Image: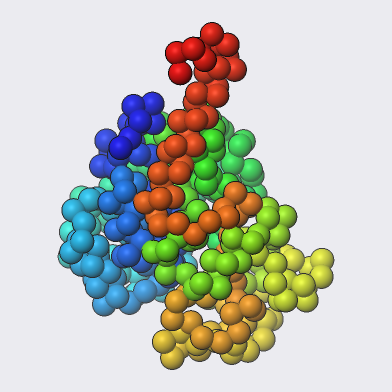
Amino acid sequence: MASHNLRTPICERLGCDVPILLAGMGGVARSDLVVAVAQAGGYGILGMVRETPQLIAQEIDAVRARSARPFAVNLIPAATDPALLDAELGTCFDRGVAAMCFFWDVVPAAVARAKAAGCLVLHQVGSLQAALAAEAAGADILIVQGVEAGGHVHGTAAALVLVEQVARAVQVPIIASGGFASGASLIAALALGAQGIHCGTAFLATQESFAHDYHKARVLAAMAEDTVYTDAYALNWPVGAPVRVIRNSVIAGLGVNLLGHHPETLPPEVIAYEDGRPLLKYSTDSPLRSTEGDLEAMAAYAGQSAALIDTLPTAAERIAMIVSQAETALERLAIMTNPFAKAAV
């Protein structure tokens, strides 16, 4: 499937055919989506942030029952109760998970424990400082996230600058994240020094995604300027944890006060339910297939790349589109830099 020009060294390291990674979106990147991405030649990451050990075991087993391709499990040590994190990691290691993906503040003990268990460690970072800290802690691969990204955003620099900055400073392979949802952006990431791209918004808007249809529809309709960077969706996470979401009535009610919100000052108003669990208005929960209630007021995560997403294909079709677009972009570059190359294309 993979074009010779698109296979990078990270493919060999991860065991995938194309350097396109599924972001481990909490709630959204469950086994159906991981299997679909992996079977299509990409690399799947299960989004198991603060999930129960039972669900994590169930989802790992579900992936393995349908695919022999490698995958990782995403956890967020800094935003998880230590006892739950210990149980989550234990479940992953008991199941022999080959790779772990961590995000937010670097927790060296978690990285060390994963390495001791024989896991490949991917770490998502949002700044040069965090990248250096993750590398020093032993991370094997860095996912470098620009501020364009949807969901929780750990930095303030644009990917165009941050990816190249980190590529110049570290020795481990890096993957670009935040605004990467097309073949042209894949080629741009490679030019910046990354070995692949990490996609959230592009895969949220697929048939296998566990996101609610309402959330998917919002992504399809959104332009880049419809997404906002705010810390209003602050419940359930550490203080000072901004996200990028699509504008809604909650955002409209904030006016210009998009930042500076503290979890303790936000009213605990129940607006929806997830399998019987009450969901609060300003929580970080996003609408999933099994969510009922006021979906419009919930966090509809999306990156600025939503502007490039206007179809709801299967994950395999999404990957095929990105690969085809990337090959077209390479051909376009060849013609632009060598007008005589057109005859050979």
Query: Horizontally, is 280 left or right of 174 in the view?
Result: right
Measured from the top left, where is residue 131 in percent x and y? 48, 43
Measured from the top left, where is residue 87 in percent x and y? 28, 72
Residue farthest along the front direction in this orientation: 343
Measured from the top left, where is residue 219 in percent x and y? 59, 62
Quadrant (top left/top right/bottom left/bottom right) for the C terminus? top left
Is 333 in front, or is 284?
333
**Coloring applied to the structure:** rainbow
Is 53 in front, or is 151?
151
Is 108 in front, or is 228?
228
Residue farthest along the top direction in this orientation: 340
Quadrant (top left/top right/bottom left/bottom right) for the N terminus? top left
Q: Quadrant of residue 340?
A: top right
The residue that appears at 82% across and 66% down in the rendered structure is: 256
The residue that appears at 53% across and 56% down in the rendered structure is: 311
Measured from the top left, where is residue 155 in percent x and y? 60, 51
The residue that appears at 55% across and 48% down in the rendered structure is: 178
